[in-house]
Amino acid sequence: MRDAQPSTIYLSDYRVPEFLIDSTSLSFELGEASSIVRSVLELRRNPESDIQDAPLQLHGTELELISLAIDGRRLGDDEWSQSGEQLTIANVPASFSLRCETRIRPQDNTSLEGLYKSSGMFCTQCEAEGFRKITYYLDRPDVMSVFTVEIIADQSRYPVLLSNGNLVATEQLPDGLHKTVWQDPFPKPAYLFALVAGKLSVVEDQFVTLSGRSVDLKIYVEEKDLDKCDHAMLSLKNAMRWDEEVYGREYDLDIFNIVAVDDFNMGAMENKSLNIFNTSCVLAKPETTTDAGFQRVEGVVAHEYFHNWSGNRVTCRDWFQLSLKEGFTVFRDAEFSSDMGSPTVKRVEDVTLLRTAQFAEDAGPMAHPIRPDSFIEISNFYTVTVYEKGAEVVRMIHTLLGPELFRKGSDLYFERHDGQAVTCEDFVLAMEDASGIDLKQFRNWYSQAGTPRLDISGRYDAQAQSYTLTVKQSCPATPGQAEKAPFHIPLALALIGEAGQLPLQLVDAEPNTETADNTELVLSVRQSEQSFVFSNIQEEPVPSLLRGFSAPVKLDFDYSRDQLLRLMRSDSDGFCRWDASQQLGLAEIKRAITAIAAGQEVCPDVEYINACRELLGDTSLDAAMVALMLQLPSEAYLAEIIHPVDVHGIHHAREALRKVLATALREELSACYSRCESDEEYAANAEQIARRSLKNTALSLLMLLNEEQFTALAIKQFENSGNMTDRLAALTYLVNSESNYKAKALQLFYQQWQHEPLVINQWFQVQAMCRLAGTLETVQGLMSHPAFDIRNPNKVRALIGAFCGQNGVNFHREDGAGYRFLADQVLVLNRSNPQIASRLLVPLTKWRKYLPAAQQLMRAELQRVLAEPELSSDVYEVVSKSLQ
Ligand code: PHE
Ligand code: ZN
């Protein structure tokens, strides 16, 4: 909780640290009531600081200080002072050894930051500023130190004691205690420190690196979860190989540990050689985990592993540079997942997340550049902007440089900065230096927030046989940034003729225009308005624009329905093909909204229905793509496009259209379902995942018909499938239907899986996301279910988060009860877990885009939260900015 008004921290105030810590020795005595932390820090003044007589100021919060000593001399109470998060020692020599002893209470730590207990085990989470909850320290990422860590604990309760680096000693101690000592040879910032103590079982494997070193791989879990580690282990080995092959990066220690914990604020954490994972991102087996769950495990395991280079060996100078490690690492894990599975599907999924969550963030009160220039609470900046848009920015560099020069750039970056704490600028400079490509204007992507808009128009001149594309760019104002300078935007395109892509000859090509082959190229858009002329074009083409989603922008081109149909049927770029289907779907939904408002029937364009029918019949297509193209744009995406947002109008129109489609395509959908059924053994491979996805898309549409036979199909699928993907899909459709089997289904499901918390989370989520009326009451009831626990972030996300963030019609109930419910929960969580509280609050912060009545109710709840006297800095920042 804050003592005073939380203050804002600015990037422009960055100063190098006044002291450095050459080595850090920690000793933990873990106890049931409290734990003792003893530290010895070898400190010296930083020769690069201009202030050579500064006092020593250490970070520390919620610590009980027992003693302090410098070079063996204990300090008197008048030799140090404390205020807020700072401990100040006025007079210190140029170099010295600081001993410090503190007491902490991990068992009372509900913030899940620092040292805390989860299901009986001790674990840590230090990023971003959690280390200061363990001991007094220079808790900033540009202070890097080598760590030696001693852990003492009861042997029977905590047989496994882990920290970073290599195990150098173990010892039995009197009174049933034991001790291990760990040494990490790589200097690291405190945020990468980790400690684990508990009763854990282990799955072991090995990996032989490129240069022939053998690495022990260990995944530590509770004994009951030993059967759910295979997929994570395989993913880890695949990721290690991939990073060698694609980036030339080898693992650097003899041991790599993963530990799974139940209570975790985020997905996982890349602590040096001791990654700590949310169980939801590491455990997987077919009976309990959906396809999406398997893919998430693969992606997160890889992500954390890739951080060993992009984050740990080369780390961030300060937290404004967070996207340096996160944007780059998300780009790396996306490319990995794409190589392991279906590239187009992965791209479409990522673009969907970007266009819904990230575009919304970039248009809302918390909009910030991928490198923010100020913050109140850094935990609020682990955002889709820093991560996903940050990854798009790295992807654009990759597109502008091409794969070879990009690799040259990343090699130079790692070589130049190994062992350093650096900035986004250092990354861009390495890319520039290695490639010789000028990224001066490109840097605007780092400093400017907001989603740029491209308005493109095309003009065909039959006489001159030329085609001219006129591109205008603009970017809306965001908080603190009224005017934006133009961005450097890579625009990948092709021109499609009757028989396919046309050869491209650009008149007056810029030097920076990369040609992939002669039918596809990447234009460098740099000006507010710019024209590109293609010569020798013998027919009026349909432009295929922003291929592969080459830039995180909103694109407007006035396509005719027929042009979109051509793209949807024949574009060779999977992303554009899918996007054309979405644009057609969007047009149909808009027409449905108008029709319903006028009391008319919803009747979609026949050509659109026919195109969907063709998709269902074409077995040569990737089933996953067909599934994606048959799904209409989500309500979340529509809320980004149709303003002001009428949640109920959008929902009803979309559902009505889905029902009409289902009616028209009844036979095809039914045949498609049967075709996709299979009894082969489950595998989480692209081909099977695609088939299940199409099968379940078909079933979800058929269920709208409310026919006995399709309900029976869903019940059969629910009762008989051996994998969670099909089972959960069937349960979802049943719960959203009028079928009176649903209560039984929910009960059966609970009974079967009550001992698997991750499955029970899915059970909560299915109910929280039910579109039918009365869901808020269901959710409120489930809050007192014995399996619910507000201290566990996964449960909060499954029940409260899913309801408020992914169930538009029910959250936006016209009486405002959904908003009130959210504000109530935020106020509760504000005390126990501020990070989760402020994340949960996000749906309310978007109040300005809804209809006036909703706006008023939402704003009133935000004001109620703001009036709470003891707001955490996390919640304070989000709520106050959203009311500004
Ligand atoms: N650094 C982690 C990741 O992206 C995320 C994280 C941030 C985890 C803060 C915990 C706390 O991989
Ligand atoms: Zn990360």
Image (cartoon, rainbow, N blue to C red):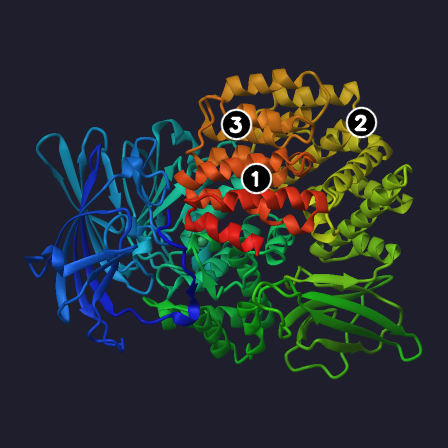
Q: Which residue is mark 3?
A: 287
Secondary-structure class at tag 2: loop
From this view, report whether residue 314 is shown above or below residue 740: below
Q: Above or below — where is 315 with respect to 797? A: below
Circle 2: residue type:
Leu
Mark 1 packing: few (<14 Cα in 10 Å), some, or many (20+)?
A: few
The numbered mark, 3 or 2, whose residue comes first in the sequence reads 3
Quarter of the image containing the C terminus?
bottom right
* Residue beneath the point at 36% across and 55% down: 209
| Residue visible at 13% across and 30% down in the picture | 176
The residues tagged by marks 3 and 2 sit, at their Cα atoms, a distance apart of 29 Å
Q: Are marks 3 and 1 in contact (CB under 8 Å)?
A: no
Label 2 sits on residue: 705
Q: Nearer the viewer, residue 546 or 386?
A: 386
Q: Is residue 615 above or below residue 547?
A: above
Name the foreground residue: 155 vs 800: 800
Mark 2 surroundings: few (<14), some (14-19) or many (≥20) residues within 10 A? some
The answer for how far apart the CA atoms under marks 1 and 2 are is 27 Å
x then y, percent, for residue 645: 72, 47
The residue at which mark 1 appears reads as: 292
Is residue 765 visible from the viewing direction of this image? yes
- Percent of width and height locating residue 573: 71, 58
